[in-house]
Image (tube, rainbow, N blue to C red):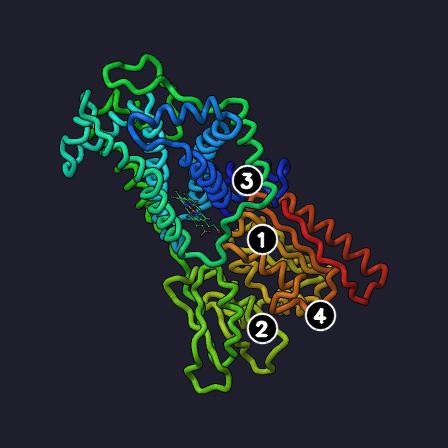
């Protein structure tokens, strides 16, 4: 039995709980990256509105924010509140997104790049929020400005020049305008660039949150903005120490630390945490399996594997072997995550093919080649006995299917269910199995991204290579479950056997064009 660490177990349980309330399609825990993008959109749109009425001068900033908050509360005030609450929400989703990748062990091995490039985005977002508070130029803005300057002055390159800006009479408009420039242009551009790098390693990156989730989040932000409008502290006064400050703990949590640590110690603490996060993917490292291999003899250069690869690891180029096809595919070994999804997308991965002894396909996984898949399938089929003989195809990253094996249930585990060629399902149904049950990661949890989606589209939506129409879809079920869902899966097999028994009793030999039964826990 696989060991599942308590953090992963807990997180999966939380996701399952959210699935009950929101359904898998709108489960926010499956869409934390896209939700963050959505909050950024809200911040951008509300920010543009605020900029129109904002006075970027030191003397006019506070009054212009007050005007929007009170006199123009019905638009300006709401925009200000949306700007603040969407920024706070983004911090929550970023931290959860980060925690999720960690909890589900999606931060090591081939994922190191996404993780390491994610860490600086946290800095960029937090510092963007800090300069935002500064611009209001109220007592909180002054507090942030003074303490930020103390922090900066502790750095050897700045060396004591910034805090002097806040000795009465010294603060210049130019310095304030510089903050405005940073917040309104410099930092957002830097963040966009950082995010572009962050998702560069991935293909088919989704940055739009599902509509229902986006609308729901916007309504929640609006309700919060009306119930608790964002307001300012009294105006900044360099000669007065503020009595009470309402900190935004999402962005300003580092400042109270300065009550206990010196600026230098605070830098050591924050850079230490950052460095630890950066090296986390190697504590300990995770090995990625061998990269996919192209077999030009069987590749006609159709490029479907390049389209399906979730990590942009396959490219199409002009043929190099003089064959009659125009193109061939090439694997970029360094980018390959060893998911095997390309094998499932290659039309040559067809167990019915080839009377020769070895089955070859256009692109294959050295650790589990298609020929081994076919010979193992034959062995599993030959060992089945009983009345309802079921084959379970599983995924190495989901529930360990070997635990489900019995005399009438044969099991096989793949690198990802996206690796399963549709013809293999047809093959087992033609060669002794009465039913095929495919189980793999829950939809939002697919370890390799897109394995489930491509499989569904190949089975039901005409994506190549298709599951042929003559395949009896009533004898196929897809039951996606978490690694912790063994008991539910066992019950599903009992239900599926009863379903197959009923079909057999009805002597239902003609394939119906019914959709495949699918459950996502
Ligand atoms: C500004 C904040 C961030 C945004 C908007 C963001 C957004 C995204 C998006 C859209 C993806 C692609 C998901 C997919 O299509 O499967 C992604 C992937 C990822 N992110 Fe972030 N991210 C942010 C910050 C972070 C941080 C702080 C970390 C961790 C330090 C992180 C770690 C990862 C990892 C490991 C992946 C790879 C997931 C995979 O390969 O399936 N991200 N992020």
Apparent side of residue 448 relative to residue 429 in the rendered image (left or right): left
Query: Which residue position is annotated with label 3?
Result: 28
Q: Of label 1 and label 2, which has the lower sequence position?
A: 2
Spatial CA distance of label 1 from label 2 is 22 Å
Q: Of label 4 and label 2, which has the lower sequence position?
A: 2
Report helix, strand or loop for mark 3.
Answer: helix
Spatial CA distance of label 3 from label 2 is 36 Å
Query: Which residue position is annotated with label 1?
Result: 440
Q: Label 4 crowding class (10 Å Cα cut-off): few <14, some 14-19, many 20+?
A: few
Closer mark to the observer between disc 4 and disc 3: 3
- The foreground one among 502 and 477 is 477
Q: Is residue 49 above or below residue 288?
A: above
Closer mark to the observer between disc 3 and disc 1: 3
Query: Which residue position is annotated with label 4?
Result: 430
Apparent side of residue 42 relative to residue 507 in the rendered image (left or right): left
State the quadrant of the C terminus.
top right
The answer as to whether callout 4 falls within 8 Å of ligand 1 is no
Question: Can I make out residue 386 in this image?
Answer: no
Mark 4 touches mark 2? (CB < 8 Å): no
Q: Farthest residue to the top: give it.
A: 243
Q: Label 2 crowding class (10 Å Cα cut-off): few <14, some 14-19, many 20+?
A: many
Apparent side of residue 39 relative to residue 494 in the rendered image (left or right): left
Apparent side of residue 159 relative to residue 101 in the rendered image (left or right): left
Mark 4 touches mark 3? (CB < 8 Å): no
Closer mark to the observer between disc 1 and disc 2: 2
Q: Of label 1 and label 4, which has the lower sequence position?
A: 4
- Residue 350: where, in percent of width, then height? 60, 73
Q: Of label 4 and label 3, which has the lower sequence position?
A: 3
């Amino acid at each position: 039995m696989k060991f599942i660490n308590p953090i992963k177990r807990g997180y999966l349980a939380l996701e399952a709980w959210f699935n009950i309330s929101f359904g898998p399609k709108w489960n926010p825990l499956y869409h934390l990256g896209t939700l963050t993008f959505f909050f950024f959109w809200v911040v951008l749109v509300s920010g543009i509105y605020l900029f129109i009425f904002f006075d970027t001068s030191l003397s006019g900033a506070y009054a212009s924010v007050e005007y929007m908050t009170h006199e123009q509360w019905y638009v300006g005030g709401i925009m200000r509140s949306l700007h603040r609450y969407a920024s706070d929400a983004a911090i929550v989703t970023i931290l959860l997104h980060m925690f999720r990748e960690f909890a589900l062990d999606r931060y090591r091995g081939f994922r190191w790049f996404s993780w390491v490039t994610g860490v600086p985005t946290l800095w960029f977002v937090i510092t963007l929020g800090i300069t935002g508070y500064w611009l209001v130029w109220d007592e909180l803005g002054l507090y942030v400005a003074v303490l930020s300057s103390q922090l900066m002055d502790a750095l050897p390159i700045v060396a004591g020049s910034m805090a002097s800006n806040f000795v009465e009479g010294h603060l210049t408009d130019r310095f304030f305008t510089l903050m405005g420039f940073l917040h309104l242009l410099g930092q957002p551009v830097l963040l966009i660039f950082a995010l572009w790098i962050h998702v560069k390693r991935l293909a088919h990156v989704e940055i739009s949150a599902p509509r229902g989730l986006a609308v729901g989040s916007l309504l929640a932000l609006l309700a919060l903005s009306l119930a608790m409008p964002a307001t300012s502290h009294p105006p900044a006064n360099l000669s007065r120490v503020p009595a009470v400050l309402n900190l935004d703990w999402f962005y300003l949590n580092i400042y109270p630390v300065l009550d206990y640590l010196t600026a230098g110690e605070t830098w050591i603490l924050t850079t230490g945490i950052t460095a630890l996060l950066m090296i986390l993917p190697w504590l300990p490292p995770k090995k990625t399996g061998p990269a996919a291999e192209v077999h030009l003899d069987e590749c006609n250069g159709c490029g479907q594997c390049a389209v399906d690869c979730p990590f942009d690891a396959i490219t199409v180029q002009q043929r190099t072997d003089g064959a009659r096809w125009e193109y061939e595919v090439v694997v970029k070994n360094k980018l390959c995550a060893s998911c095997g999804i390309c094998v499932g997308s290659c039309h040559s991965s067809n167990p019915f093919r080839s009377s020769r002894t070895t089955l070859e396909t256009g692109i294959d996984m050295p650790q589990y080649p298609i020929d081994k898949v076919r010979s193992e399938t034959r062995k599993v089929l030959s060992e089945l006995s009983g009345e309802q003989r079921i084959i379970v195809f599983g995924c190495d990253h989901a529930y360990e299917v070997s635990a489900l094996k019995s005399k009438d249930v044969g099991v096989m585990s793949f690198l990802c269910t996206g690796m399963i060629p549709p013809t293999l399902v047809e093959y087992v149904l033609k060669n002794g199995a009465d039913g095929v049950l495919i189980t793999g990661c829950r939809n939002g949890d697919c370890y390799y991204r897109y394995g489930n989606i491509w499989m569904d589209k190949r089975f039901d939506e005409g994506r190549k290579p298709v599951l042929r129409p003559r395949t009896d879809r009533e004898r196929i079920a897809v039951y996606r479950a978490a690694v912790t869902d063994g008991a539910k899966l066992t019950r599903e097999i009992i239900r599926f056997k009863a379903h197959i028994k009923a079909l057999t009793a009805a002597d239902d030999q003609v394939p119906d064009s019914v959709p495949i039964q699918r459950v996502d826990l």
